[in-house]
Amino acid sequence: MPEVETPAPDARQAAPHLVAIDWGTSSLRGALLDADGHVLQEQSHARGILTVPAGGFAAVFDELFGTWMRETGARCLISGMAGSRQGWVEAPYCPCPAGLQELRAQVVEVVPGRVAVVPGLSHEDDGVPDVMRGEEVQILGAVALTGIADGLFVLPGTHNKWARVRGGRIAGFRTCMTGEFYALLSQHSILARTIDAAAPLDEPAFLEGVAQAGNGKGLLHNAFGARTLSLFDRQPPAALASYLSGLLIGEELRSQSVGGEDELLLIGAPALVRRYALALDSQGVRTRTLGAEATWAGLHALARLG
Amino acid sequence: MPEVETPAPDARQAAPHLVAIDWGTSSLRGALLDADGHVLQEQSHARGILTVPAGGFAAVFDELFGTWMRETGARCLISGMAGSRQGWVEAPYCPCPAGLQELRAQVVEVVPGRVAVVPGLSHEDDGVPDVMRGEEVQILGAVALTGIADGLFVLPGTHNKWARVRGGRIAGFRTCMTGEFYALLSQHSILARTIDAAAPLDEPAFLEGVAQAGNGKGLLHNAFGARTLSLFDRQPPAALASYLSGLLIGEELRSQSVGGEDELLLIGAPALVRRYALALDSQGVRTRTLGAEATWAGLHALARLG
């Protein structure tokens, strides 16, 4: 098992007490935390739940984390899609508003006393339900790390989450399929013919897209501009992907009405978070950003509840 | 050539004078018109320009329309993508505002005196160009057929066109990728897993989608509702496609601000036009509808200019 490293001697001396895992759809990240929540070791694998055959979760877990579990005697908390119907064990959604206490009350034990799965959250809005799995732990971890108990927390990804936090609990949230729309348009639509999706971020083209999204003509129309700008040689293929990305993120910001916020908290992968920070900055909204540490802080905070 | 029928004797006596063709990306429709613009015969084929090898347009034309051309001595006008860079001959876009006279002035002869290609239109809006090819003929044909010289004309399809007509000319227009977004979401997105895209129109679910689109939360968010409504068993797979279609068309109507119009003119395939008529009716907007006859009327009107 070359992917799992033996803890260093000083790690063992620090009395590690939690194996924290975010087991998503397409990938899996894990960290070994000490009693204070400090990260001793981390690992990540392309072993999302979609790669695990039915009944195979215990074996994959033991392969990747067995050494940590045996050598440290730690407990393990798992957030993310491992708690979905297609995961290791189904942990039913916890309704909003919800904080650490509500999540803790619905944790599902897989190996009693050792391994448990954290539930996701659901939220009902105008008769339509919304769901998240994994992001609730990142949000509550960010609350713990920053001390911000009231605000708008944005988690960019394939399916972005916009969460309203009040009094340290998640009051409600919305999902935006912005990342998936970008993939569909840049890979499968008529735009795919002229877009160089592998090109690096072109900031001016990106911000031009963000600004265009504010024209009030709607995404269904504005997206076609990525076609015609190419047809008339107004944007090179290398800039079009950034322009389209700007159109989509701009549309997301417009429809989520962020204008009233002074500061947003962004949690996610640095390259994507940077795009949101750029777009928000162009609209006069300040941002603070967090990465994987939010997940570990959230699982640590949950574990401390016992 | 079984697809081309010999004109009936009475057709020949009526002095047919125009072979009218709408040659699009994926399909081709043609009609033999008499001197008054009456349709004597029609044919349609899955022989869009994407199916024609480079240099092969004359041969396909002769195969499908040679009999009509030889037996009647008619002229032929072709609208649509046949005039694009990938078509038979490129007919550069005619800028808006444009009516029949402007189009006529930019017709490109392919076989001098016999076969000519009609240009498409371009329109510049806030620094972003927009284009159409084929729809301009349908719109001007609809003006000729209905006598409506001022109004909003909507042509649903893969890439919908919203055209403002003033004084019988096309003042400007916008493209909306609504049809393509529907195809992308229902076939390639996470929604595809639970949508039965082949299910017939479910009017209540469709109108529920139209209404949801008005909630101001944006398409990027609302589309995810088609996922969660399924996850919570609130919409059966057979209704989800209609719900998603309603979300998209509702978003299009919202962003194109049709509220100020008393009546819209819809031109297109009956099944799709019906959805727009239903959605608009739910918002108190009356509609008139036209089909293929608009194309023939437009090409006939152009041919009469000589």
Image (tube, coloured by chain):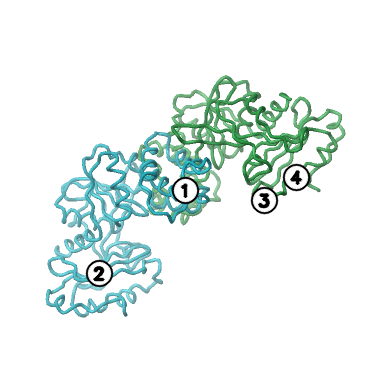
Chain colours: A cyan, B green
Mark closest to the chain's N terminus, 3 or 4: 3
Which residue has dot 3 on it? B51
Percent x, y for residue B3? 78, 46
* Alpha carbon distance from label 2 to label 4: 65 Å
Mark closest to the chain's N terminus, 4 or 1: 4
**Please, what secondary structure does the residue beneath circle 2 have?**
strand
Which residue has dot 1 on it? B240
- Which disc, if any, is residue B58? 4
* Alpha carbon distance from label 2 to label 3: 53 Å
**Please, what secondary structure does the residue beneath circle 3 have?**
helix
Report in which chain the residue with disc 3 lies. B
For the C terminus of chain A, give its image quadrant.
Answer: bottom left
Q: What kind of residue is marked 1? A: Leu
Which residue has dot 2 on it? A42
Residue in view at x 21 percent, y 73 percent: A114
Percent x, y for residue B44? 71, 43
Q: Can you tell which of label 1 and label 3 is closer to the viewer? A: 3
* Alpha carbon distance from label 3 to label 4: 13 Å
Q: Is residue A206 left or right of residue B93?
A: left
Q: Are marks 1 and 2 on the same chain?
A: no
Q: What kind of residue is marked 4? A: Ala
Percent x, y for residue A170? 22, 50
In this rendering, the answer to whether B249 lies above or below B297 is: below
Q: Can you tell which of label 4 and label 1 is closer to the viewer? A: 4
Residue in view at x 40 percent, y 39 percent: B212
Q: What kind of residue is marked 2? A: Glu
Dot 2 surroundings within 10 Å: few (below 14), some, or many (20 or more)? some
